[in-house]
Image (cartoon, helix red, strand yellow):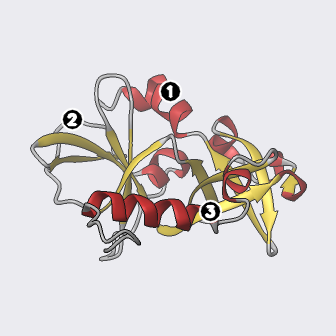
Amino acid sequence: MQQATGERRSPFLVLADYEQRSLAHVAGLPEQLDAPGLWRGVAYRVGGHRLASGFDEVVEILPMPALTHVPGAQPWMMGVANIRGALLPVVDLKQFLDGERTVLHERQRVLVVRQAGGDVAVTIDELYGQRSFIDEQGIDAEALADGRYAHFVDRAYRMNGQDWGVFSLERLARTPEFRQAAA
């Protein structure tokens, strides 16, 4: 790209200039990302529960990996998977919470969650992607947090007629029962 004086700019300076001009035209973007009363996360379904977890709690989202069974483990411990050379325990979240085994399908996903001692993957039935909620959409979480979900859902929102519980994957990873997968 030529400047008015006829000098040639480096490709880096050209890209930096494009970036500055692009950011100047995105009105209100920082305010939208850090708006008070705005909560954003990854939305998914486990059984009949529509849930969302904070971006800071989900390390990665993966297709269902190949599993190796672990003898003597809890029924909800599906096995271990080799993810890029690291062994990752894979937990059937629906079975852990509801006692009902997840029916696996080709579009199955797992959420990778950081926990002390290494990451763990939990199955979800359906991935909805990113969701943003505002305080005005808040509803009573007790209506959604039945059974074992009550320990992990302390906030809920209603958007477009659908109720979403904010599920704490961090609290799940700290739960002694969850950490002790040996039968």
| Between marks 3 and 2 in the image, the one whose residue lies nearer the viewer | 3
| Between marks 2 and 1 in the image, the one whose residue lies nearer the viewer | 1
Which residue matches tag 1?
A: 175
From what the image shows, is residue 76 above or below residue 115? below
**Residue type, numbered disc 3:** Ala
Q: Separation of disc 1 and disc 3 at Cα?
A: 46 Å
Q: Please tell me whether mark 3 sits on a helix, a strand or a loop.
A: helix
Could you tell me if residue 94 is visible in this image?
yes
Residue at the limit of the structure toward the left, as seen here:
85
Which residue matches tag 2?
A: 72
Q: Specify the quadrant of the image occupied by residue 23.
A: bottom right
Could you tell me if residue 47 is visible in this image?
no
Quarter placement of the C terminus: top left
Depth check, front residue: 61 or 23: 23
Q: Along the horizontal axis of the image, is 152 left or right of 141? A: left
Residue at 64% x, 66% y is 26
Which disc is residue 151 wearing? none
Residue at 81% x, 46% y is 37
Residue 129, percent across and down? 52, 67
Residue 177, percent across and down? 45, 28
- Whether residues under marks 3 and 2 lie with C-beta atoms below 8 angstroms apart, the answer is no
Q: Please tell me whether mark 1 sits on a helix, a strand or a loop.
A: loop
Residue 130, percent across and down? 57, 63
Residue at 51% x, 59% y is 20
| Between marks 1 and 3 in the image, the one whose residue lies nearer the viewer | 3
Depth check, front residue: 108 or 61: 61
- Whether residues under marks 1 and 3 lie with C-beta atoms below 8 angstroms apart, the answer is no
Which disc is residue 24 wearing? 3
**Residue type, numbered disc 2:** Gly
Q: Total marks drawn?
A: 3
Q: Specify the quadrant of the image occupied by residue 71.
A: top left
